[in-house]
């Protein structure tokens, strides 16, 4: 089943409380901010710190997002695990919550051949009824989906597209070229620096981590493009690219995004993984947020 996803989906952060436990009211607040800006939700991904969430927490996060959105925008949930078995088990539970689609990162830590990736994704797509999006982020996983592999997987009736977060125009263009003649298979752009270019060249949607910090500014890239104002979309991208460059010069995502939200007064807590910010870094982020969003 193909399920067309369009526009901006925010790779929503997972808020924690002072003890590091899930803060679901805080998550509801963050989802509402995105809906107000016209954005859909991508939950349980890199910016959602899936790698430090247990299975019950991943389910709770997705349930909260689905219930808060209440059909007003798309909700895509990430379900990728190292093993095919665990991915399917989580995927079935997530699908039952009513998401529009799921996204599956390549297995990580262990290197896999392209034939093994095809077998993995085919088994996942066979086992689920909800549409599946491939998720390519080789810098974090150590495994890269090649364009020919994606083309082969695009023939599966339950694989609806790919989210490419490799970070380069060349990678994005490679996937767009590989599936250009396959109807209904969508390429979703991951890097915030390529949102406008992605729409120009045929991406149906973007998955944006920076939209947590600047929901309206990110949405403007899409809404202007969708309205036919290509130059206005390009200008909106320039503003976002400056913010991205400055913020990620201080620290990497997802911790940098979460720290920026904290500084903006949002109740999202600290990141769970072993990252620490100096007072100087916090001051830098405060300056970036103040100057970029005003």
Image (cartoon, rainbow, N blue to C red):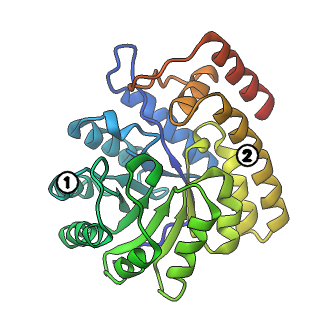
Q: Position of residue 10 (x, y in %)?
A: 53, 48
* SS label for mark 1: loop
Residue under numbered circle 1? 83
Task: Compare residues 55 and 178 and report the one nearer the observer.
Answer: 178
Residue in view at x 31 percent, y 80 percent: 156
Residue in view at x 43 percent, y 46 percent: 140
Q: Residue furthest bottom?
A: 181
* SS label for mark 2: helix
Q: With 22 as the anchor, is 292 left or right in this view?
A: right
Q: Is residue 131 above or below residue 55?
A: below
Q: Position of residue 108 (x, y in %)?
A: 31, 50
Task: Compare residues 97 and 77 and report the one nearer the observer.
Answer: 77
Q: With 59 as the anchor, is 285 left or right in this view?
A: right
Q: Find the distance from the CA under tag 2 to the CA under tag 1.
A: 36 Å
Q: Position of residue 55 (x, y in %)?
A: 22, 40
Residue under numbered circle 2? 240
Query: Which of the two marks, 2 or 1, is nearer to us in this view?
Result: 1
Q: Is residue 186 above or below residue 180?
A: above
- Identify the image quadrant of residue 224: bottom right
Q: Is residue 34 above or below residue 137?
A: above
Crowding at dot 1, Cα within 10 Å, few <14 / some 14-19 / many 20+, comes out as few
Q: Quadrant of the N terminus?
A: bottom left
- Identify the image quadrant of residue 285: top right
């Amino acid at each position: 089943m193909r399920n067309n996803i369009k526009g901006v989906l925010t790779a929503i952060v997972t808020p924690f409380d002072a003890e590091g436990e899930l803060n679901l009211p805080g998550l509801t607040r963050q989802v509402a901010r995105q809906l107000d800006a016209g954005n859909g939700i991508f939950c349980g991904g890199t910016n959602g710190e899936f790698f430090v969430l247990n299975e019950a927490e991943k389910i709770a996060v997705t349930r909260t997002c689905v219930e808060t959105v209440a059909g007003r925008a798309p909700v895509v949930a990430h379900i990728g695990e190292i093993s095919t078995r665990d991915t399917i088990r989580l995927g079935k539970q997530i699908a039952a919550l009513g998401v529009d689609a799921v996204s599956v990162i390549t297995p990580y830590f262990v290197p896999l051949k392209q034939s093994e990736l095809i077998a993995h994704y085919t088994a996942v797509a066979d086992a689920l009824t909800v549409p599946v999006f491939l998720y390519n982020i080789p810098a974090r996983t150590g495994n890269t989906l090649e364009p020919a592999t994606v083309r082969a997987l695009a023939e599966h009736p339950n694989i609806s597209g790919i989210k490419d977060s490799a970070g380069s125009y060349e990678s994005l263009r490679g996937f767009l070229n590989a599936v250009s003649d396959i109807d209904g298979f969508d390429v979703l752009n991951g890097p915030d620096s390529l949102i406008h270019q992605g729409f120009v060249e045929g991406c149906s949607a973007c998955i944006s981590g920076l939209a947590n910090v600047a929901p309206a500014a990110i949405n403007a890239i899409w809404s202007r493009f969708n309205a036919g104002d290509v130059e206005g979309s390009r200008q909106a991208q320039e503003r976002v690219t400056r913010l991205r460059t400055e913020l990620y010069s201080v620290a990497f995502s997802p911790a940098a995004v979460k720290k920026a939200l904290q500084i903006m007064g949002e109740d999202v807590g600290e990141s769970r993984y072993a990252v620490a910010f100096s007072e100087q870094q916090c001051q830098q982020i405060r300056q970036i947020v103040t100057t970029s969003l005003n």
